Amino acid sequence: MFPPLDLLTVPKPLDDGLVARPVPWLLRHAIVLAAAVAVLLSALATALALAQPWVGLRLQVQADAVRIMEVEPASPAAAAGVPANATLLALVPGDGARALRLEPGDLIEDPDMFGSYAAWGRFYQRQDLAAQMLRAPALRLWVRAADGRESLHVVRPAPTRALASLPFAFWFQLLVPVAGMVAAGWALSVYPLQPATGFAAAAVLAMLVAVTAAAVFSTRELALPPALMHALSTANHAGSLLSQFFMTAAAAYFPQRLGPRRLLAALFGAYVVGAVADSRWWLPSPNWAQRAMLLTACVLTMAQLWRQWRAAADLPRERAMVRALAWPWALGLGCLLGLQEVPMLLGLVPPLGQSWVLGSTLILTVGSAVALRSQRSFDLDDWALQLLLIWGGAIGVLACYQLIRAGGWLNEGLAMLAALALAGLLYAPLANWVWRRVLARRGPSPRELTSGILVLGLSPPDDRMHHWADLLRQTFHAQHLEWGARSGAAATTAVAIVGGGTALSVPPVAGLPGMMLWHKDRGARLFSRSDCRLAERLLELARRTIEARDAYGRGAAEERARIADDLHDDLGAKLLSLAHASTPPGGGDDVAALAREALDEMRLAVRNLKAQPTPLHEMVADWRAESVARLRAAAIAVDWEVHADDGGQLIPARVSLHLARVLREATTNVIRHSGASQCRVRVAVAGGELHLQIEDNGRGLDAAGTALAEGMGLPNIERRARRLGGTHRLSPAETGGLLVAVRVPLAPQRPELAPASRI
C-alpha cells in the first residue's frame, strides 16, 4: 500500500524509526520545484548573455596582449575577414573617433580581482566605451597578424549573440547550481521539517544566484554595460556571502542544534551590512570587502563543524555525519579559497579560471545533500574519501596544466599530456599512501586474517566460538559484541547493518552462533558496506575451513575406529586365548598375568583410538575389576570407594586413558614395593573434577623413594596428571603407608560466555 497523498513517511535524522508527518505540497515536490527554479534562473542568465552585441571572436590574454584565438564561423568577424591567431590591438569607432587600445585587464573575469576600487572604476569606464562601440552599426578592429602586419577590419556587430557561441565555461557554471538545486530539493523531500535542511537549501539557492550572475559576466565576449556588470557583480557577491552564512547556520543545526539563535541573527545582519557596503564600495578596498568576509565566513563554518565534532564525542553515528559533511565542505571551500580568493588577497594571479573554481561548489552542495540524508550515513566515510581523492586528482591535473601553459613551454595538447603525466607520477603514489594510511590501517592485515581463520578451523569445536568472537572483534575493533538468540543475529541469514551503522549483524555459520558487533573502531566510526563485504568473506572462509577440518576429523575417526576394531577382533581374541591357555594347571601364572595385562593395555588403546567418551559408571567398573583382580592376586585386601553422582556423566577418552594408567602405575607400586597387606582406592567426582586416591599400609615414603630411584612409575603419574591440567600429591597415609592423590578437571578450563552477553 502506498501512503496517502497528504502524508509522507519522514525519517528522523538521528533515529531509525519512521514517523508519519503531514508535509506541505510544496515540500513534497521540492525536487521538481528546485529544478524549475534552477532552470528559470539559468534561462534568465542565458537570455542576458544572448542579449549582448556579438562580433564572433574568442579572445584570450597571452603575454600581456589580447589574442584572437578563434573566429566563429558565419559571424560578423568572419564576414569582415578578421584573421585568427592574431593580436587585437584596439577598437576603433566607425566615426573615426579616438580608438580604445585593449589591455589584458579588459578581459578580466571578475572586476573584484582588482586591488583597488579606483582600478575597478577605470575598468567600468573602459567597459562602457567598448560596450558603446559594440552597439554601433559599424566597428573597426585594429589587428596585428602573426607575420607582424597590421590591418583594420570593418565589422558590423550582430545585435544578439549566437547560442552556439556561448563557451563551455558558461554552461559548466550553470550546471553547477542546477545540480546543487536538485540535490537541495532531494534533501528537502527527505527531511522537509529539519532546520538544517532549510538552511542548506537556502545556501544552494543563494549560490545559484551567485554562480548564474558570474556565468554572464565572466564569459562575456569583450564588454558589458557597466550598470549590468555592477548588478551582476553585486548579485554574485551577495549570493556568495549569504550562501556561506546559510552554510554556517546549517552547521549549527546539524546533526545537533548548538545555538544560540541570537548569534545567528547577529551574524546574518553582519552579512547583509557587509554585502551592502561591498556593493556601494564603502570599504577600504575589494580585499576588505567580499573576499575577506568570505574568508571569515568559511572559518566560521569550519569552526561550527568543529563544535559539532566535539559535541558528538560519544555519538559515533553523529560523528560520521559530521565527517561526511566536513569532507565536501572542506574540499569545496578549500578549492574556492585556495585557488581563487586567497591568491587574490595576496595580490597573486589565481592558477585556475573562475568558472573552474566555482565548479568546486558542486561538490559542496551535492555532498551536503547526501550528508543530510542520514539513512545512508554509514556509507559516507568511504564515499567522501573516494570523492576527495578523485577531485584532488582532477584539481592536480588542471593546476599542472595551467602552470605549464603559463610558462609557455608547450602548446595546449602537449601541455595537457604533460599535466596528466606529471599529476599521475606525483598524485598516484600520494593517493595510494593516503588510502592505505586512512582506510587500510583500520583493520588487520591479510596475513593476520588468514592466521585467525586457520586458528579457528584447527581449534576443537568447544573453542571455536571464542576464537570466532576474538577474530570479529579484532577485525572491526568492535567496542563490544553480543551472541546468542537474544542478540538478534541468530535469526538472520546474511550480514546486515543495524542501527544506522552502529552495529553489524553476523549470522550463524558452521555451528558458530550469530554475533552482533557494536561500535566499530571503539565507537569512532560506523559500519559500512565494505565492512559487510569483509564479514561475508570471513563467514565463507570460516565455513569452508571448519567444514574441511570436520571432514578431516571424521575421516581420522573412522580410520581409528577401523584400527581399533581390527585390534579388538584379531589381537584381542588371540591374547584372550593365550590367557586362558596359560591358566594353571595347563600353564604358568606369570604367562597368564602378562597375557591379561597385555589384554587390558590393548583394551585401553582401543578405547583411546575410538576417542569416544566413556560413561562414568563403566569407567569406574573397569578400573575396579582390573585393580581388585591384581591386588587380590598379590594377597592384598582391597577397600574400594566411589563418591560421585553419576547422572549419565561422560568422561572424555583422553582423561579416562591417562587416569587408568595412573591407577595401574599406583597399584603396581603397591604390589611390588610397598609390602602392604591392605590398599584403599577412592574415586570421587565433585566441582567438575575427578579425585583419585590410592592409599596403602606398607612402608610408605621409603618405598616411594626406592621406586623413584629405580625409575618406576611414580614419575609417569606426575607427567600424566600435568598433561590433563591437574595436580598430584605424594604424602604419608593415615595407615602408615603412602597416599597417592591425583586431581584432574573433566573438561578444559576456559572463560565461558553467557548467551546474549556483551564482551
Image: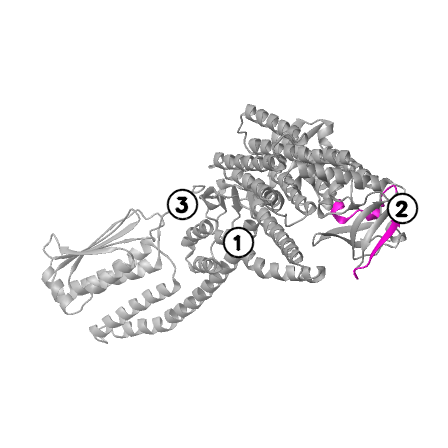
Q: Quadrant of residue 693?
A: bottom left
User: Which numbered disc covers residue 208?
Assistant: none
> According to the image, label 2 marks what residue?
156
The picture places residue 716, in percent across and down from the top left corner, at 23, 64
> According to the image, label 1 marks what residue?
434
In front of the other: 305 or 406: 406
Q: Secondary structure at mark 2?
A: loop
Q: In the rendered image, is residue 625 in sight?
A: no
Amino acid tagged 1: Val
Identify the image's colour scheme: rainbow, by chain, secondary structure or one colour.
Answer: one colour
Amino acid tagged 3: Leu
Q: In the rendered image, is residue 497 in sight?
A: yes
Q: Is residue 392 left or right of residue 555?
A: right
Residue furthest top in the image: 262
Q: Is residue 256 left or right of residue 657?
A: right
Q: Quadrant of residue 3?
A: top right
> According to the image, label 3 marks what residue?
753
Range of residues picked out in magenta: 146-172
Q: Earlier in the sequence, mark 2 or mark 3?
A: 2
Q: CA distance from mark 1 to mark 2?
A: 57 Å
